[in-house]
Amino acid sequence: MKRTYLGEFEEVVLLTVAVLHERAYGVAITDELDRQTGRSVSISAVHAALHRLEEKGMLTSHMGDATAERGGRRKRLFTVTTLGSRTLHDIRSMRDQLWNSIAPNALPAISL
């Protein structure tokens, strides 16, 4: 199977879609990114990442029902695919392995 790599922003967007689960759409993802990371991103940057992740097969989307709060407009809702889930688990496993391989006192102390 061909391995697909993610950029850091794509990884964070994919994780945010997983966090929001059935409530994942553009504005909600942008707001959650800001809340979780303190990182202010534009809605167009989020939409571009969502498009790339769909092209890579890591997300699927469908149109939700029209809502009164949006003046009758529908939201495009995103869901993590099996490939997206596998990719996130692989990334987590690789990062855990690297963190666990760091020798004690190899990193300068920092105050959190």
Image (cartoon, grey):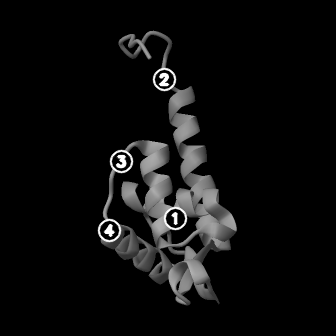
Local SS, label 1: helix
Local SS, label 3: loop
- Residue at 51 percent across and 74 percent down: it is 2
Numbered circle sitting on residue 39: 3
Numbered circle sitting on residue 64: none
Q: Which residue is mark 1?
A: 28
Q: Quick one: label 1 or label 3, which is nearer the N terminus?
A: 1
Q: Which residue is mark 4?
A: 45
Image quadrant assignment for residue 96? top right
Image check: 53 left or right of 64?
left
Q: Which residue is mark 2?
A: 102
Q: Position of residue 104 (x, y in %)?
A: 50, 12
Q: Quick one: label 2 or label 1, which is nearer the N terminus?
A: 1
| Closer to viewer: mark 1 or mark 3 | 1
| Closer to viewer: mark 2 or mark 1 | 1
Q: Position of residue 76 (x, y in %)?
A: 54, 83
Q: Amino acid at mark 1?
A: Ala
Q: Quick one: label 4 or label 3, which is nearer the N terminus?
A: 3
Q: Amino acid at mark 2?
A: Ile
Viewer-side residue, 95 vs 8:
8
Does any portion of residue 60 appear in the rendered image? Answer: no
Q: Quick one: label 2 or label 3, which is nearer the N terminus?
A: 3
Q: Position of residue 92 (x, y in %)?
A: 58, 47
Tell me how far mark 4 sits from mark 3, CA to CA.
Answer: 12 Å
Tell me how far mark 2 sits from mark 1, CA to CA.
Answer: 36 Å
Q: Quick one: label 2 or label 4, which is nearer the N terminus?
A: 4
Tell me how far mark 2 sits from mark 3, CA to CA.
Answer: 28 Å
Q: Position of residue 101 (x, y in %)?
A: 53, 27
